Image (cartoon, coloured by chain):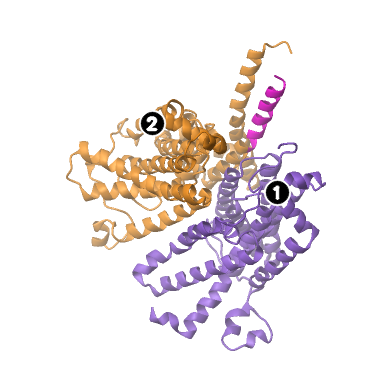
Chain colours: A purple, B orange
Amino acid sequence: MAELFTLPVLLGILYSGIRLATPYLYAAIGEMFAQNSGVLNLGVDGIMLMGAYTGFFVGMKTGSLWLGLLAAAVTGALMGLLMALVSVTLKAEQGISGIGLQLFGLGLSTLLFKLTMGSVESIKGFQPVKIPLLGDIPYLGEALFNHNLLVYGAFVLVPISSFILNKTTFGLKVRAVGQNPTAADSLGVSVDGVRYITVTLGGILAGIAGASLSIALINLFQENMTNGMGFIAVALVYFGSWRPSGVLLGSLIFSFVNAFQLWIQVKGIQLPSDLAVMMPYVLTILALVFAVRKQQPASLSKPFERGEM
Amino acid sequence: MTLKPEVKQVLNRTLEALLPLTAVPLAMIIGAAVLLAMNINPLTAFNALLKGAAGDVSGVTQTLVKATPLLLVGLGVVIAFRGGVINIGAEGQIIVGALATTALSVGFPDLPRGVLLPLALLAGTLAGAVWGGIPGILKARLGVNEILSTVMMNAIAVQLSNYLLRGPMIDPAEIEHGTRIAQSALLPRAVWLTKLVPRTLLHSGAILALVLAVLVYIFLWRTTIGYRIRAVGLNPDASRLAGINVPFYLAISLILGGAFAGLAGAVEVTGVQHRMMEGLSSGYGFSGIVAALFGKLHPLGAIPAAILFGGLLVGGNAMQRAVQVPSALIDAMLGLIVLFVVSADIWARYRARRRETSG
């Protein structure tokens, strides 16, 4: 364990911690919009898988990673629309419909993978782009400012989403619809309309989160490759008390624990390695315990019905 | 309308009961569309599916073998749902249940069957109850979202199983031969469940599941605890005012849900595999939720639903073997069925309200 406290190891963990935060950030920020408007989308993991598959497949077939990313975003939007239809218009129980969406995404991505590819192939994903000047800082430059564009995108998303949520009319509507849909409705805000937008936006970002795995971080697609990341992303929104900065903090804690866990595994330290793989999940449960006392959007997971008091 | 009100009510009720049934053909149509887009004849695929699930004695018995864990899991899900909590953790509860049953059976191979078998099943049930109890107590005491915590408990159970099956619980023969496949030793014959039909896999666990379905019905509708569980599920605020200890019943619902899934794991390991291995559950925890929903969250409704989905799983594997259509098609269809069934609820509610307002 003493090896941990050497500069190269610490910088390595810093580097991979930043990288690994990417899918969590995209997925959790998207989910944060949905939850702030009152919709709990538990199907994020299924959307991520569909995004990972389409991103990889289109990227591979066309040779353009950007087209792959676009395809993943479009697929995510469609899955988000499906969730919105089921949970907003048809007012289905959100805890269950999300699980349905997850099963659907898992099954369909596996089916399409087996029919169109059959075996795991790899792809040359998004390459690191060094940020001028910052990237030349000794030691830290390499760890912080030499990542691929999707990694930077995930971090840029945090202030952008914070601005949208707190400083724009749309953000105000989202929060109003989440806190008090009846009042928002009486002021002429379309509750269902806002929720359709946020859930679809959440879908787009979950699709991109999936693609970030398959064409920017791991650079391959395999069956159930998210391994429950989408569920962790949903939990991170609770942990981050429905605020972008909180989600950022949660994602970073998470990805650093993950990076640390991977390091233990690679080192092959036996006993901690077996326990280390459980750490992210144990940590999520602890995060949920700490999230309990925070104020959640009042109408979270409650479908809106006009005239119901 | 010339129909008598009673007749109309019966018709309405029947329509509501039948509505979810349309979910299966609807999911099949979408599945067929995907296959068509992939240049596969859906009729060939579905024909292979039907033949595999119900074509002969082997198919029918296999369907019932798969239906058994689905029914047990479904019963646990029904209790939890009726108590107002959502248990997504059955997959992990099955795994820890199977692990506990295996550990106990392998640890005391010389005990007589009359002692060892009940103890082994009990160990699995208790392990599942503990695995469901952790989210249950977190929910009751601290209000932790049980959907997310049960999902996390699934992941922890998988890792725990991987660790135990590669280390402390690995079959000594695997180490001897140097193959090191992650599976436990074979269970002593004393805990193997009795075969119902010779030369098939069908075992007495199926009967146990059926009996328990009836008992759960009696429990939920004929006992005080069952009544309180349902009261808390229907209206926690009113229950609290009526003096019911709401957190206690929330925890009990999740503990019982876990116990049934744990028993499903115990039955799977003593009835089918006769040893613990990776992938023992292969998604029963999730298919069981689908069966419970499809059975309208009624213990007796879960029986035909479990058989239907058991058939789909068996047929899906047969389809994969016979015409090389991946069985993942079935997973995708199960997901759609869940979406359809929960969406159909609104029509039932809408009709119910119209009934109320029209007197």
Vertical placement of residue A278 versus A9, above or below: above
Determine which residue is flagged by label 1: A81
Asked if residue A168 can be seen in this view, the reply is: yes
Q: Chain of mark 1?
A: A
**What x and y, as percent, mark residue B254?**
45, 43
Tell me which secondary structure the magenta stretch mostly adopts. helix
Q: Residue at x 33, y 58 (%)?
A: B164
- Give the total of numbered labels: 2
Q: Nearer the viewer, residue A261 or A103?
A: A261
> Which secondary structure, mark 2?
helix
Q: Which residue is mark 2?
A: B212
Q: Residue at 41% across / 51% down in the picture?
A: B279
Q: Position of residue B24 (x, y in %)?
A: 58, 34
Quarter location, residue B194: top left
Residue A81 drawn at (x, y percent): 70, 48
Badge 2: how crowded within 10 Å, few (<14), some, or many (20+)? some
Judged left or right of residue B48, residue A48 is right
CA–CA distance between discs 1 and 2?
40 Å
Quick one: A206 or B65, which is closer to the camera? A206
The disc labelled 2 sits on which kind of residue?
Answer: Leu
> Which residue is at 63% across, 46% downward?
A301
Query: On the rendered image, what quadrant is the C terminus of chain A found in?
Result: top right
Query: Position of A62 compared to A8: left or right?
Result: right
Q: Is residue A11 left or right of residue B269?
A: right
Residue at 63 percent of width and 80 percent of height: A145
The magenta-colored residue range is B343-359
Chain where mark 2 sits: B
- The reply to whether residue A219 is in sight is no
What is the quadrant of the N terminus of chain A in the image? bottom left
Q: Is residue B131 magenta?
A: no
Alpha-carbon neighbours of circle 1 within 10 Å: few (<14), some, or many (≥20)? many
